[in-house]
Image (cartoon, coloured by chain):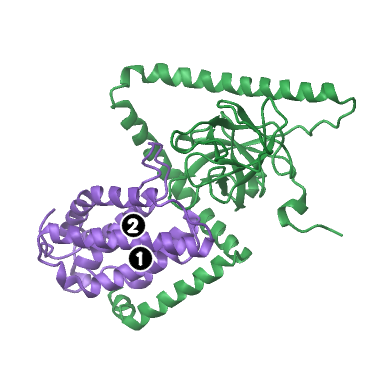
Amino acid sequence: MSLDVWTWPERAGGLARLLVPYIFIALFFVLDLVPVHIPPFGEIRPCFSIMSVFYWAVYRPTLIPNWFVFGLGLTLDLVSGIPLGINAFIFLLVYWIISDQRRVFVGQPFVTVMIGFALVLSISNFLRWFLFSVLSGVWPPLLPVLGVILSGLFIFPLISMLLYTIHKNFAGAGNPDHAQP
Amino acid sequence: MAAAAGLWSRPAASFLLLFFSVILMAVSGAHSPVVEQMRMRATDMLTPLLVQAATPVHGAAAFVRDVSGLAALQSEIAALRDENARLREWYNRAVYLENENSSLRGLLQVTPDAPHEFVSARVISDAGNAYVKTLLVAAGSDDGVEKGQAVLSGEGLVGRILEVGRKSARILLITDINSRVPVIIQGSDAHAVLAGTNDDRPVLKHLPMGYKALEGAVVMTSGHGGIFPAGLPLGKIKAVPGKTSVGGPVFVDPLSDFTALSYVKIVNSKIDPNLKTGVLNP
């Protein structure tokens, strides 16, 4: 269907389908930064951005290009104060590997996706800790890193449910090819 | 977008971007001033967004606190907290004046410190990350904020300005592993350096030989080094079960709760330019 025969509601729907996933990626990015004022959540706040990177890499790898994933990580590096390139490297690596191996997760029960995410989250957090330590010359305590991993695992089913709803209604034709969490 | 995605989804493009990330890490690790400028420029651009985002999140956090069974006591607690903060400021002021007074008694001639002005700034990004203990505030060089200035809360010293943009600045908290603050322990002439550990409690280093730390003693800035004004309270010496031992590390409980900071005060004092650049003029 060409664009000139679309009605206004159809055009608005098309625009929403294009923008809503990006709006939520931006929202998760902001959630990674804003002060939460609820101790100790600030210390062990999960990385929301990596959840959206993982989700879209599995279920809709064509939605976000890899330069966008790189830019997302780099902006997080710039604003959060850690050495540049760490999150850019990790986000891109996760997106590349997961989108390449997505057949492992697509159409599988949610528990399979959860196990995959647990692996990705653990490896990416320890990699971030290692890269930060090597680059800054100080080795921060590991306990908060474990807290970040656990809080991420705890909240991922909720985030996954939210992204599933967005995916179903805005980011693709028909139902996404996975089980609802 | 789809065409761009197709082009950039090629493994070669991903590999190039990964390689670029590694180069960025190497450049960033060298602490280049260009990186610092880039960082603050990006932060300046995102400041309006973060200021807007902080408002509902702050409201949501207050809501969570309200519904956690203390709703009825919330207003009373808030009023008491305000009063407590005011009294604490007076207490700190009194302790400072008492110290100053006793020092002045011992001296006949002394050059008084220049009076300080303050810039109040809203906290727009959290200290919450396992790697760096920093805060972003919505005040920058346009508001008179400069690198190295001391940052206070109602309770005591929070940290110092690490990076400055036009509209935003990054504060290095006293708990950050890279933070070092010259301090003096109240009621003694013991000087030390308060070193961050990335944990909740920084430790005192370079204490005088044989010094016995008393739990509850207030730790204040000594003013040595010229970065921090003298007499700003930071925390109290705390015995930590399982960690504190004779000859072991001396822990300090910060007076400020860094997770609950909404606003901070930046001491707008002129800092010797040599201290900022680290280069002495001949």
Q: Chain of mark 2?
A: A
Q: Earlier in the sequence, mark 2 or mark 1?
A: 2
- Coordinates of residue A53 in the picture (x, y in percent): 29, 63
Pointer 2 and pointer 1 on the same chain: yes
**Is B112 placed left or right of B143 in the picture?**
right
What residue sits 19% from the left and 71% below the top? A102
Q: Are marks 2 and 1 in contact (CB under 8 Å)?
A: yes
- Coordinates of residue B11 in the picture (x, y in percent): 32, 81
Name which quarter of the figure residue A74 lies in.
Answer: bottom left
What residue sits 73% from the left and 56% below the top? B278
Circle 1 is placed at which residue position?
A91
**Chain drawn purple in the picture:** A
**Chain drawn green in the picture:** B
- Coordinates of residue A86 in the picture (x, y in percent): 44, 65
* Mark 1 element type: helix
Circle 2 is placed at which residue position?
A49
